[in-house]
Image: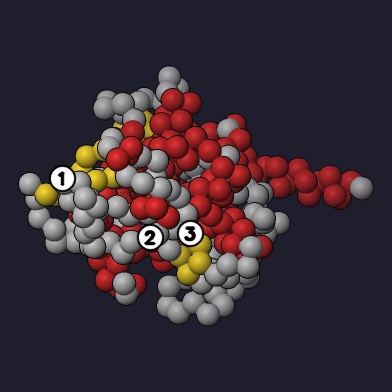
Amino acid sequence: MSGKNMEEKVEQATNSKNISLPVSRVRLIMKSSPDVSCINQDALFLTTKATELFVQHLALSSYKNGSGKETNTLSYSDLANVAEETETFQFLTDILPKKILARDYLKSLEEMEKDDENL
Amino acid sequence: MFQMDGDSSTTDASQLGITGEYMAGSHFVLAQAPEDEGDEGLNDHEDGNGSKDNLREQDIYLPIANVARIMKNAIPQTGKIAKDAKECVQECVSEFISFITSEASERCHQEKRKTINGEDILFAMSTLGFDMYVEPLKLYLQKFREAMKGEKGISGVTVTEGMGEELTEETFTNPLPAGIITADGQQQNVMVYTTSYQQIPGVQQLQFS
């Protein structure tokens, strides 16, 4: 079976089998990893499906983690918190830095500079 | 394994919008500046784009509408999702895919194979702390395969299970190309297929009405 043909079939099957993510885009992201040559169809499907599960998992964990503080809204900081607190999501901490108020940052910068001067 | 450039913490000046996204008096400064993400993209094994063409690998995301929809269905109905949370999950998703793929790819290389297969992916998930996905994924894969076979132009196909004892061991050992129907002396026409890495316990049969 040719690769292109297979991808069309995969798309068709995924439409009827409740996958709501574009398989071809997933493939693109996978291929952008270094040293990845071929990805078989099962691997592609599994990754796509796993990604769905991941989104659900991340969204729900963050929402639960944050609710009570926020007004029923899943916010960025909920995500950042869950990444820090949950081992499974720790690989995300670098892309989910906790935002701090700019003025707090500038203040701490100033303090660091003062410390340097005092040395 | 997973490496980030060292200066990706929030104390990095470039991330806190000093490059121009600083908004005086605003509640939060967005720790995002697209140009600055060039160094800490989705794949940390290489520094630049390498051989990638127009699209930077860091820019490849799944469509936000799809991602948002899945998120919405996951949280209670009354819940809402902030826009920056959606965008953020979009990036997390690409990160996740790369994370799994790198791990799977590594295993592949160790075993001197060139093609990443389903087992590599499942193994990677288990290794990286997502073993709770593995069992559901195996089930989905099974269903997916059934759907794939079903869409080869054979009409009126239904799938039933449970007649495994009537087939011999031999039928499982030879992989049959999909679409070939073998009659093995029983009343029904039976199509048996085996997978490259996993035998599906029990028998999948197609009945023609």
In the rendered image of this protein, does residue B161 appear above or below residue A30?
A: above
Q: Is residue A107 left or right of residue B116?
A: right
Instruction: Name the amino acid, label 3.
Output: Asn
Q: Is residue A55 visible?
A: no
Element at label 3: loop
According to the image, label 3 marks what residue?
B117
Q: Is disc 3 in contact with disc 2, using a CB cutoff of under 8 Å?
A: no
According to the image, label 2 marks what residue?
B175
Instruction: Name the amino acid, label 2.
Output: Pro
- Marks 3, 2 in one chain: yes
Q: Is residue B87 left or right of residue A119?
A: left
Residue A103 percent location from the top left of the image: 59, 42
Number of marks drawn: 3
Q: In which quarter of the view is residue A39 placed?
A: bottom left
Residue A33 percent location from the top left of the image: 53, 65
Q: Chain of mark 1?
A: B
Q: Residue at x 61, y 35 (%)?
A: A87
In the rendered image of this protein, does residue B159 appear above or below residue B7?
A: above
Q: CA distance from mark 2 to mark 1?
A: 22 Å
> What mark, if any, has residue B187 been given in the picture?
1
Q: CA distance from mark 1 to mark 3?
A: 36 Å
Quarter of the image containing the N terminus of chain B? bottom right
Q: Chain of mark 3?
A: B
Residue B204 percent location from the top left of the image: 28, 45
Q: Nearer the viewer, mark 3 or mark 2?
A: 2
Instruction: Name the amino acid, label 1.
Output: Gln
Crowding near the residue tagged with mark 2, few <14, some 14–19, many ≥20 C-alpha atoms within 10 Å: few
Q: Residue at x 92, y 48 (%)?
A: A119
